[in-house]
Amino acid sequence: MLDYEFMRNALFAILIITPLFGLIGTMVVNNKMAFFSDALGHSAYTGIAIGMLIGVSNNFISMAIFAILFAILLNKINDSKIASKDTIISVFSSTAIAVGLVILTKNGNYTEISNYLIGDILNILPQEIFILLGIFALVVLFWIFGFNKLLGISVNPTLAKSKGINVKLIENIFVILVALIVTVSIKWVGILIINSLLILPAAASRNISKNMRQYHLWAVLFSIVSGILGLVISYYQGISTGPTIVIISSIIYFITFALRRFSID
């Protein structure tokens, strides 16, 4: 399998992407932001559409800029308490994907980017792997210097603020990182399942973890195992890689769920 360069590139990409999903996914689950990351994935079409309208040929740039602005706006509106968080996110998500599809279908560009729905990690290029490495470095830096603050905010924002933590700054940095990870991964993972890869490893880890360290370690391990097994199985079975990874992650989740139920009983 590794005799082919495209498979080696795909493996390198998975070894970078999956730990990112594992780390970020733990806090996405912790902060009940599953809808949030899903909305970011859906907003990709709008980013591509707007980029095409203003003449941006690089879809990643237009998606990334729009996703970051979209994430910060959602984060700000969530604090307004005008409506429940899931309602606000659902409204923005539905609107974003509808606007994007309207623009793309009007200009006849929909078929060009329909592959973003399911993605294809086998098409990743070496220079794109370096982009992933850059984002990986950003996430590691944030985890070193900002994780405890983010954890404090997720537990009690008021107490965190009283301790001198800049709550809005930390929250905005986190949602920007989520936006970047979602955006950079969509091309290879697909809009339809990007959220699953963020949520499932973290949710599985939560079923069996007894402390925060185990929570992160298991999430990263489950994500990496799912990614490697998904790539190998998809190669030998001739099926799509992204959905295969999600199926492996789902199996791991149900196993850990059963283990949790067994330990409780």
Image (cartoon, grey):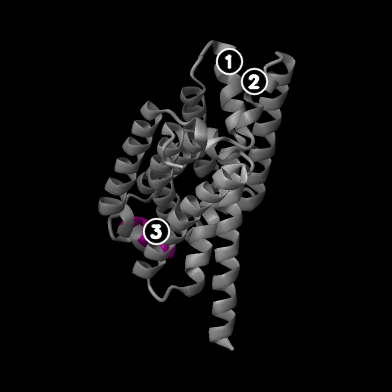
Amino acid residing under circle 3: Ile
Q: At x 49% / y 68%, what residue is drawn? A: 206
Q: Position of residue 171 (x, y in %)?
A: 41, 48
Give 222 or 134, whichever is nearer the viewer.
Answer: 222
Residue 254 in the image, given as x and y percentages of width and height? 60, 68
Q: Earlier in the sequence, mark 2 or mark 1?
A: 1
Q: Classify 10 Å Cα crowding around label 2: few (below 14), some (14-19), many (20 and above).
A: few
Height in image: 220 above or below 172?
A: below
The residue lying at 72 percent from left, 23 percent from top is 102
Residue 224 location (% of width, % of height): 43, 54
Q: Which residue is mark 1?
A: 52
Q: Is residue 149 left or right of residue 259?
A: left
- Which of pointers 3 and 1 indicates the residue nearer the eye? 1
Residue at which label 2 appears: 112
The residue shown at (60%, 31%) is 116
Give whichever of discs 2 and 3 has the lower sequence position: 2
Q: In the displayed image of the protein, which residue is found farthest to the bottom?
A: 265
Residue 226 in sight here: yes
Disc 2 marks a residue whose amino acid type is Glu
| Residue holding disc 3 | 153
Which residues, given as a range, are shown in magenta? 149-156
- Give amino acid for label 1: Met
Characterize the magenta stretch by its predominant secondary structure.
helix
**Relative to 240, does residue 45 appear above or below in the rendering?**
above
Provide the secondary structure element on which disc 2 rests. Answer: helix
Element type at marker 3?
helix
Q: Secondary structure at mark 1?
A: helix
